Each structure stands twice: as structure tokens, then as C-alpha cells.
Image (cartoon, rainbow, N blue to C red):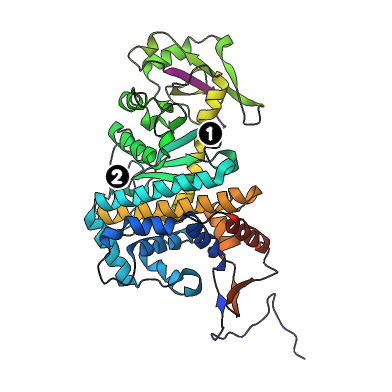
Amino acid sequence: MKQPTGSYLHVRVRNDGRAVVSQVGSVLLVETVRKIGLDRAISAALTPWRKPRAVHDPGKVLLGLALAVALGGDCLADVVLLRSEPAVFGPVASDPTVSRMIDTLATAGGKALTAIRAARAEVRSRVWKVAAGQAPDADGRVTVDQDGVLVVAHSDKQDAAPTWKKTYGHQPLMGFVDHGPGGTGEAVAALLKPGNAGSNTAADHISAARLALDQLPKTYRRGRQTLIRCDSAGGTHEFVAWLARRGRRLSYSVGMLITEAIHQHVLKVPASAWNPAVETDGEVRDGTWAAELAGDVLDGRPKGMRLIVRRERPYPGAQLRFTDADGMRITCFATNTPDRPIAELELRHRLRARAEDRIRAARSTGLRNLPLHDTAQNGIWLEIVQIALDLLAWMPMLALTGQARLWEPRRLRFRLFSAAGQFVTTGRRRILRLARHWPWTHEITGALERLTLLPNPG
């Protein structure tokens, strides 16, 4: 008997497999769509753009693209993944039909975008209500993080321009709902901007904030229970004044540039006024302190604003800036939250770094590039990306437990969505069999059981 050589077994390949389904773990996303009524909402919103004799519903086509992006696709043609598995995804439109649908919605401009966003907001309110204690507003507060994303263009596309990082492309301004330490986050705003657009343009931050607020349940569209966080790009008088305007009165925690006036006040802060910063577990953060500025440095600023400065020992090899002092890195942010300890406010603002995790997830979920040429078409693509990101946040929130709720898209695809299975028909029932040896089979079956227990959409 001839002994095999090498580390791996030699196999023979045949392409006549039956009832074998790849990417079968994606039934988690499909079942989530069905349970929250996203398919019905998107279809109803896009009814005006369905032609009388059309075979494929525009809402189903758009949602199919979002599912393809959630599974790792980054262009319209990747919907072929869904077309190859009709047992899971149903009938899927051809590539020309998908392309024509995108052109139709892009031609409609703002009307189509408004309809899609209204459907998303309606479903979001329903999901948060069903999620109850797992929802991001479980403590009666909602935090929205704003941040810009550089998307490189490798070809000449409409509104693509040189960026401040010496690349070429676009600079969307995104908004994410923070789920806190027990979850991920939802995409609630995406404002498409040219690559050479100003990073600290107040009008852009106001527009992105409007988009984000419109996605929240009506209870959170105004009032101090909603917190807007952003870095120093949003630290303009116009944007802060808009957030605090009467009738809106949102809470904010906005990074500020270190001006000469702020720098001079920092130099005068006595040593006793610096409070040690803390970590999320309450322990003191080594080498970091925070203090509040007062006096004429607040002249001309909105009523109720507090200026918090942080000094931090720089990491080895870091280059200090001229705004730093005494060998310490100095940063500043503004907030209108009263009667809260300085260390608590500093920690809350520092947790804005979670937005970087959301951006990383967005890059791996269709935002690595904008695949279409026209700005209007890429605007529709951004809505598709946001739907995909919402699904990747809602499914874990509703169906997963423990550390699995924190899995980012790449890990969800590797561990859950990529699982294979087999459909078995017995009587009038279709049964999906999963491989017993797959390490995360119990995660998939447990999640499906939790989704089954959720109420069907009314």
C-alpha cells in the first residue's frame, strides 16, 4: 500500500454535489430581516420606483445587495453569491437588472434616499423596542459618534479629489450609534463629500447630525438624553451653537483646537486642579490628568459650555507639538453636561475612540471603495452599506450572547456565515442540517432559536 506524502490528504474533486448549501450561516441575516420587517419596509418605501410589469421588487433588489455587502461583497456583481443559493435567498435579480435599479434610484436623487432612510428609521425603532434591555437606549440615553472616513479611489470618479493625506478619493462623514461595552454600533449617517472638502466645515457636521437624529426614535431627536461626540473637526462655534440651540438642547462632547488663549490658561492651571483620569473599571489611568478651564476663555462661547483639558505623558518617541506644555501632550474638549466629575467626562469623551472600530468595520463592509462612477450612484451605495452595517449590528444584538455580541464583521463571516450545510426535504418541511464538527454550530443554532422566539412583524 502506497503511503501518502505531505502534510495534507489528497482529494478528488467532483462538481455534482446535491442539496449542499454554502454560506448557510447567512440564514441568521435572512431571518433577522424577516423578523424585524426590514424587507417589507424597504419594499413599501421603494414602491414608487417599481415598474408595472417588473418581475423583481426594487426593495428586494436593494436588500439583496445589502446582504451581499454584509457577507463581504464590495461591488454590485457580488450579488452573484446570493443568486447561487436560491434555497436561502430566494430569486435574485440579474446583474443588468441590479444596475438599472441603481441608476433609477440615483436619478430620483433625494426622493429615493429620503424613502430609504425613512424605512430604516422605522425599522430601527422596532428593533430597539424588541431588543429591550440589549438596545443601545436601555439606560435612557443614546450616544452618536461622528467621524470622517477617507475612501481611496483608484480611478477617475465624480467628485473624487486629492485628500489631506495625499491620497485621491472621497471623504464621507459618518455617524454611528454607540452600543457601549456590550455591543458594536449602528451606522446612522453617511454624508458623501469630495476628497478635498474641509474637515471642520460646520455645515457638513450639521447635515450629518440631522441625518443621524432622523434615524433615532422620536424621543431621542432632541433633549439632553442624546449625546453627540466628535473630534476637533467638529469643534466650531457654529456646530456647537446648533447642538445647544433652544428647542434642540442636545448634549455634546466635542474636541476643540488648542488656541493661544486656551494654551495660556493651561499654563496657569495649578497642580492641585489636575484630576487623575480613570479607566472604565474605575482604576486610575497612569500618566493622564484632566482639569476644567474657567474665566475669560469662555467669553463668547455658548451658555453652559465647559472646557475640559487633558494632559498626558506622551508615548516613547512621540513628537510634541507647539501647543503642548511641560513635556505633556495637551488636548481639549467642550461639553454642556453639568454637575458631572471631570474624570467621568474625560473618560466619556475618550471612549469616542470606539468610532474607529466602527470605521474599521465599515471599511470591511463595502466602504473600502466606492464602486460606481457618479456621485448619485455612490450615494445609493452608501445607503446599502449602512443597511449592511445595521444588519451586522442588529443580528448580534437580537440573537447572540456573551462575547459573540462583540464580534466584528470579519469574525462573523469567518465563524458563522461561512458555515456550510445541507437542505433535507421530509414531508412538507425543509430541514437545514449543519455540520456537527463545525466549532460554532451551537452559536448558529442558538441564535436561530432566539430569533424564532421574537414576535413576527405586525
The residue at which mark 1 appears reads as 351
Q: Nearer the viewer, residue 145 or 171?
A: 145
Residue range corresponding to the magenta coloring: 305-316
For the point 37% across and 31% down, which residue is it? 234
Q: Quadrant of residue 276?
A: top right
The answer for how far apart the CA atoms under marks 2 and 1 are is 26 Å
Q: Would residue 164 be found to the left or right of residue 351 on screen?
A: left
Give the residue type that dot 1 points to: Leu
Which x, y percent locates residue 212?
Answer: 38, 40
| Quadrant for the N terminus in the image | bottom right
Position of residue 352 relative to residue 183, above or below, is above
Which x, y percent locates residue 90?
Answer: 45, 71
The furthest residue to the left: 107
Give me the disc on residue 193: 2
For the point 29% across and 33% down, which residue is it? 201
Q: Secondary structure at mark 2?
A: loop
Position of residue 407 relative to residue 300, above or below, is below
Q: Secondary structure at mark 1?
A: helix
Question: Pointer 1: residues within 10 angstroms few (<14), some, or many (20+)?
Answer: some
Which x, y percent locates residue 287?
Answer: 60, 24
Count how many numbered circles sit on residues in the image.
2
Position of residue 20 relative to residue 289, above or below, is below
Q: Nearer the viewer, residue 46 or 80?
A: 46
**One can see residue 414 in this view:** yes
Give the residue type that dot 2 points to: Lys
Q: Would residue 448 be found to the left or right of residue 227 on screen?
A: right
Question: Pointer 2: residues within 10 angstroms few (<14), some, or many (20+)?
Answer: many
Q: Quadrant of residue 211?
A: top left
